[in-house]
Each structure stands twice: as C-alpha cells, then as structure tokens.
Amino acid sequence: MQILNYLLMAQPTGEEGQGSPLGMFLPLLAILVIFWFFMIRPQAKRQKELRKFRESLKKGDKVITTGGIYGRVASINDNFVVMQVDENTKLTVDKASVLKDPSDLQQAQK
C-alpha cells in the first residue's frame, strides 16, 4: 500500500500541487485499457469470425448480403459470389458483402 501511495501521491519537490507523472497518466491509461477491452477487442473478434465464415462458404449455403438480399450460394470465386435468389434469378455480389446465414441470425435472436 505504501508503494501505491508513493506512486500516486505528490512527491516532495518544493512546489505544492505537483503530483507524480505516473499518478497523472494512470487515469488516462485506465480509460485506454477499458476502451480497448469494450470496443476494439470485440470488433476485432467479430471481423475474424466474419472472415472465417466468408472463407468457408460453399455451394448451397444460405446467405444474406449487406443490402438485405437473401439467397443461396450458386458458385464462388476468389472475389465474388454468385447467389441464386429465385429459381431463374442469379446475382453476382462481392464476397465482402456477404453476411452470415439467415438461419444463424434467427437462432441467435431466440
């Protein structure tokens, strides 16, 4: 406890109100750690899961695009996916616009 008081409390420098540099930056450091833990880390995890999902796409998978179009994967290329949205309708969309399987989204809501 004495070490913590030593680090956070004012050092005898001859000037009143002068605090330890570590004591001044400790709240800022704590805010940065909390920000990373609650904002950056979960977003990176979601991006990793989405990248893994896009890499594992195969013919016949149900998908939804970022524009809200539901369909099944008809074929896959490195950069794009051909989706069958109806019996006679196929759309070519960028692979980056493909989101998770709609049935996975419905199960997550339950």
Image (cartoon, helix red, strand yellow):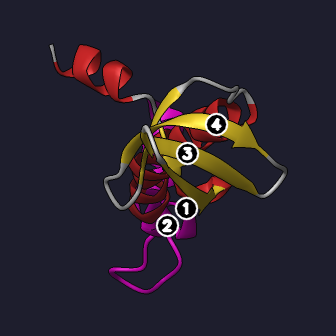
Label 1 packing within 10 angstroms: few (<14), some (14-19), many (20+): few
Is residue 3 shown in magenta?
yes
Q: Residue furthest left?
A: 110
Which of disc 4 and disc 3 is earlier in sequence?
4
Magenta span covers which residues?
1-26
Q: Secondary structure at mark 3?
A: strand
Find out whether the residues at labels 3 and 2 contact each other: C-beta distance under 8 Å: no
Which of disc 3 and disc 1 is earlier in sequence?
1
Indicate whether 59 appears above or below 22: above
Kind of residue at disc 3 = Met
Kind of residue at disc 4 = Ala
Residue in the image at 27% along x and 19% along y: 108
- What residue is pinned by disc 3? 83
Residue in the image at 64% along x and 49% along y: 82
Q: CA distance from mark 2 to mark 1?
A: 5 Å
Find out whether the residues at labels 2 and 1 contact each other: C-beta distance under 8 Å: yes
Find out whether the residues at labels 3 and 4 contact each other: C-beta distance under 8 Å: yes
- What residue is pinned by disc 4? 74
Residue in the image at 33% along x and 80% along y: 17
Residue 38 spot, x, y in % from top left? 38, 43
The front one of 27 and 44 is 44
Q: Quadrant of residue 93?
A: bottom right
Kind of residue at disc 2 = Phe
- What residue is pinned by disc 1? 22
